[in-house]
Image: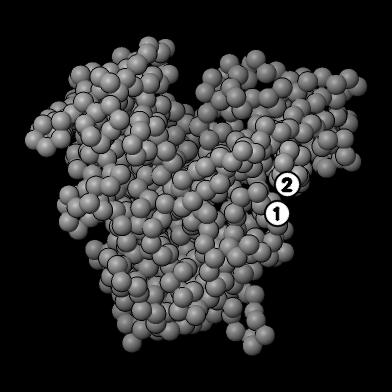
Amino acid sequence: MTHRGRVLVVGADGADPQVLSRLMADGKLPHLARLCAPGAWGPLQTTFPPVSPVAWMTCLTGVLPAGHGIRDFITKAPDSYLPTIGLFAVRVGPDGIPTYTSRCAVPTLGEMVSQAGRTAFILKVPGTFPPVSIRGGMLAGFGMPDVLGTFGVSAWYTTDEATKKASAPEGVELVQPLAPAGGGAWSGRITGPAQTAIGFSLRRDSSQAVLQIDGRPPVAVLSPGEWSGWVRLAFAVPGRGTIAGMCRFKLVALGSVVELYRTPVECTPDAPLFPLAAPAGFGAYLESLVGAFATLGMPADLDGVRRGIVDLDTFLEDAYANWDQQIDMTVRLMLAFPKDGQPAWDLLFTHLFAVDNVQHLFAHCQDPSHPSYDPQCAVRMGDPIEHVYRWLDDRLGMLLEHAPSDTSVIVISDHGGLPVYRLVYLNAWLWRHGYLVPRETQPDGIGARVDWGRTRAAMFGTGGIWLNVQGREPNGVVTAGAPYEALRQEIARGLLEWRDLETGQPVIKQVLTGESALGSGVPGSADARAGAPDLMVALHPGYGLGRGEALGRVMSGSTLIVPNLSAWTGGHEGPYLVSDVPGIVVIHSPGSAPVDVRGAGLQDIAPTVLRLLGIAGPPGITGRSLV
């Protein structure tokens, strides 16, 4: 007999089965341990590549990437040599404001539940931008941009611009001046959509600073280390009128050097520039429950840390504030009752980036073998990874406390996480072996464009290699048919022979064809090959792709493999084989027969939820119910 009540799904992005097992055995995750009965939890097979939008859309649709259409963060645009975003298509209007169209080609779980006459709330699942209207509501996840149309551009304002820029060359465009304005005051500018901007002032008042926006009354009085609340902004865009935005500020320092951090300027929940929620009023409804909240798809400034501008303490303060507010939002939505006294939802699916983000930035913290290990940082920060798992367990306990007694609970992660010790440059390897020719010479650390008239193969995105095939590409040089297949096999053999000269270890664990990697049931079929790379590499754990080549460029330095001294000390994207970075699945259902999750994959989650709700799945789902 299957459950016919309601289902709560908690998306614990990045939760790793090995870490989970260790912490549960130590008694540090009591709420998860209570749910993890034998057979009801275990590893969950991810997608290839194991990146969040690809994986979560497989979870939400029950369909592998070849079918649902989202295959990577970045991919090569069809019929050109340009990179393009893999989540959605973008078109910029004459007013400079972009519009977006999702690349997802099949119904999502929220739509399936809605079509059955039931109510679903889907909160911040990656890949759900732009959101689709469902019975209930969908709040867009990763992909939802800031008001600039980016994944999140913050700013670090300082009176010592030169020193800050010199300390973080990758983040110079995020460093903005605080210009002296006389009388112990400074001024700065906030960039908005369509190249608009508004001014602000910061004035010293004893040991505090008073923040004013565009000459209006003060919006915050801050001591060093303090954060403002959400500050609402208004940008006058020609042809569009006033566009609302919002951000938060932290006064970092108020001494001989004054520094102010600003989060990305995000869309407001009640009047978003870009489609935040569906139906359209759902964002405003959520704001009525919890107040203004982070609307950016990635609600933590990973990019600012990665570029060396944002310190780890500032990152964690901002991130945990946003994650905690999403838990509050989920609880309040869970408790919103209609007139008949019953919960207003059948499916509530909330996604949290917490574990994933912390594993990316703190994999080195307790690992003396990591090139970025810093004993002083390890003592000061403690074990941030254990802390975030314990935070997740505590917040899960809050959700369980408020869930109705007939609720089935599913906890899932889309992948695990690994430390990344060394970085490899795949396009540089293709160049070194005569398959790629740069168009220009660039200084070390700067990606050079590719000369496609003389290039046979190049990588875009997360390890996808495209061959420059005649008749398929604008300036193709590789003959289709037997020469094409021979070149694929030649490159694959060479990559498998690649050894790290410093360690002697192999770099590439497996080379797959695009059609097999993306999950088509019929290798070589048209649906799998359309837009897919010709080859996809899987790295050995411990290696990761270096930055700068995902956009179809080639790093011009002579070293193909370097120690990972970046801020991105851990990862899952690799690309790694699905068996190397499995996620987790936990199923606790009060009204179902015993569960067996052995061999479970992300494509099995949607049919499992439908089965628990007593809803028949649509044709085309490739996953199976786990109950």
Q: Is residue 133 above or below residue 151?
A: below
Sequence-wise first label, 1 or 2: 2
**In which quadrant is the C terminus drawn?**
bottom left
Q: Amino acid at mark 1?
A: Ala
Residue that numbered label 1 is attached to: 271
Q: Residue at x 65, y 81 (%)?
A: 338
Decide if residue 247 is in sight here.
yes
Please say if the residues under marks 1 and 2 sit with CB atoms less than 8 Å apart. yes
Q: Which mark is residue 304?
A: none
**In which quadrant is the N terminus drawn?**
bottom left
In the rendered view, does 157 fall on the left or right side of 130?
right
Q: Residue at x 45, y 57 (%)?
A: 12
Could you say where residue 261 lies in the image, as x and y percent from the top left? 68, 33
Could you say where residue 602 lies in the image, as x and y percent from the top left? 33, 60
Q: Amino acid at mark 2?
A: Ala
Q: Is residue 212 above or below residue 58?
A: above
Disc 2 element = strand
How many numbered marks, from 0 up?
Answer: 2
Q: Is residue 562 above or below residue 486?
A: above
Name the colour scheme: one colour
Q: Residues within 10 Å of mark 2 (few under 14, many from 20)?
A: many
Disc 1 element = loop
Q: Residue at x 70, y 57 (%)?
A: 270
Residue that numbered label 2 is attached to: 244
Could you say where residue 160 lies in the image, as x and y percent from the top left? 70, 18
Q: Is residue 57 above or below residue 84?
A: below
